[in-house]
Amino acid sequence: MKMVVTDLTRMYSGHICVAGINLDTGHRVRPVSGLLRARLLRTNGGPFDIRAIVDLGKTQDIGRAPEIEDVRFSPKNCIELGDMPPEKFLELCEASASGSLAPIGTDLQQFRTSLATPELQGDCSLVLVKWPAIPRIFVNGQGRLRFTFSDGVELSVTDVRLYKEDLETPNRPQVQILQERLKTSPDVVLAFGLGRPWKQPNDFMKRHYLQLNSIHVRDEPGWQLDSPLTAVANPLKASVDPPSESIGSNPRLGEDASADAKERKHDDYQGSEEVSTRAGADIPAHIKKARETHPRAYEPWSEKEDEQLLEAWLIGTTASEIAREFGRNSGAIRSRLKKLGIDPAAENQLEASDTNEHEPISPDQELLGQARREEILRQVPAGPDEGGGDALLRLAEAGPEQMLLFLGAMLSRSVKRPKFRQALDEVLGSLTERRRRIIELRFGLTGNEPMTLQEIGDIFGITRERVRQILATVLRRLSHPTHVARLLEALR
């Protein structure tokens, strides 16, 4: 599949999301392969940049509402074919653009100060809109990049080109230049997208939140990462100092108030610089060492980071894995989860090291567990069509453990259903090699008989208890509705 990139979206902790237009069909497409790292950006040696024409290689349609545009691909097979000319790129975007957000569907409604759809609701998740007014892009008081959609509604702006290399800090000069350019450019195409579902604190459901993925302007269409926007020439500026009517002054208070404000701002800057220098000299050695190990250990938490933390936790990522991605320590992750209303205490028992010698499971307890597994296997239908929809529904309600046992039993009986293996590859593809192997051995997903905890432990040189901990962690991740739905679809 060949596509031209129209959206480059920043995600948490050095990850990105890419979307574009399928050059064969003209449809919107989002290539996915787990979490895409920032090294896939052209500035980091990868193939992706705005206007880049990319051959994704062999793809597989995995779209489901509202993310119908998703296709699975392999980044290692991705080939960059060059760039689409700027004018042709803008023409393609305008031809694909709608006049509003209507294509997303009627499920898109205002929720608090944003727009969102309930989980798995909506007709699509990507839409290009030819915007009828001058968009207002700005950095708010909390240092977050926002787009004023309407009165009382602001959307997050995730365009990679408007952030610094860390993909966290807004590039304020670029934002200011873009805002000036938007005032003079008559044709603006905005790329909107629904994010992955997540549940806000004190909300009763997960939602897909709308965000502004990319901005395309007529004056400099398809500006790229390695060629940022150039400042807009303003012949009205006669001096370096801005006039009293400029942004930052208050015309109702007069020029004196504006001068006082500038003086206070200068004094505040000098004072903060002194405090910063003094604080840097007084940093204790243990804090310096902690920052070397965890670069963001002492940085304040942002609202966006809280969103990313909850999203990662809800899809089953462990606290230790999140800590590595966020550049913080696992204790800080657990503490923050508690403040967000989630008790991660159970996770403490699931993240013991591989050298853990504590084995609370006795042989008798393991035999009881094996007996329960055998009872489940006796209830598995003899064939893929036996039992009907009610049996599959009961299986889905029982959870991922029973569904994996079912699949293992079907494979051991040599039932030839390609969708089984395809679904398993999709669900288990995000796991590490060792975790995936443990799951396959435990549930007989290789076509062999399921193994006991002790047998698996002997293979990997770890204890029975450690195998149980790994299984519990993975099963919690696989209990996410997305994974359950994929397994259930394969069983139909």
Image: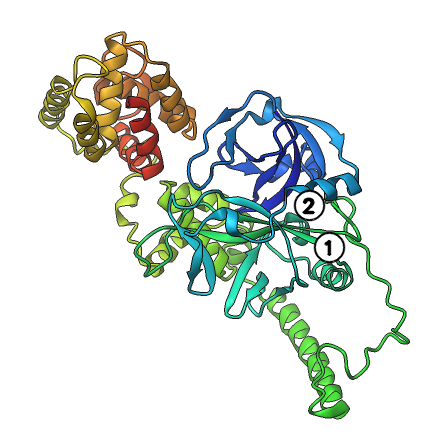
Q: Which disc number belongs to residue 260?
A: none
**Residue 476, image x, y percentages:** 29, 37
Name the residue tied to disc 2.
94
Q: Position of residue 103 (x, y in %)?
A: 51, 47
Indicate the position of residue 64 as horizontal and vertical percent values. 42, 35
Q: Is residue 394 left or right of residue 163?
A: left
N-terminal of the pair, mark 2 or mark 1, is 2
- Residues under labels 2 and 1: Cα distance? 9 Å
Position of 372 with respect to 290 (left or right) is left
For residue 122, side relative to residue 459 (left or right): right
Q: Which residue corresponds to the image point at 26% horizontal and 31% vertical from the top-left?
A: 400
Say which of 413 and 468 sits in front.
413
Helix, strand or loop at disc 2? helix
Label 1, residues with CA under 10 Å away: few <14, some 14-19, many ≥20: some
10 Å neighbourhood of mark 2: few (<14), some, or many (≥20)? some
Q: Are marks 2 and 1 in contact (CB under 8 Å)?
A: yes
Q: Is the N terminus in the top left, top right, bottom left or bottom right quadrant?
A: top right
User: Which amino acid, mark 1?
Assistant: Asp
Is residue 460 positioned above or below 41 on the image?
Answer: above
Residue corresponding to mark 1: 187
At label 2, the amino acid type is: Glu
Residue 66 visible from this viewpoint: yes
Q: Residue 461, can we see it?
A: no
Q: Is residue 232 above or below residue 255?
A: above
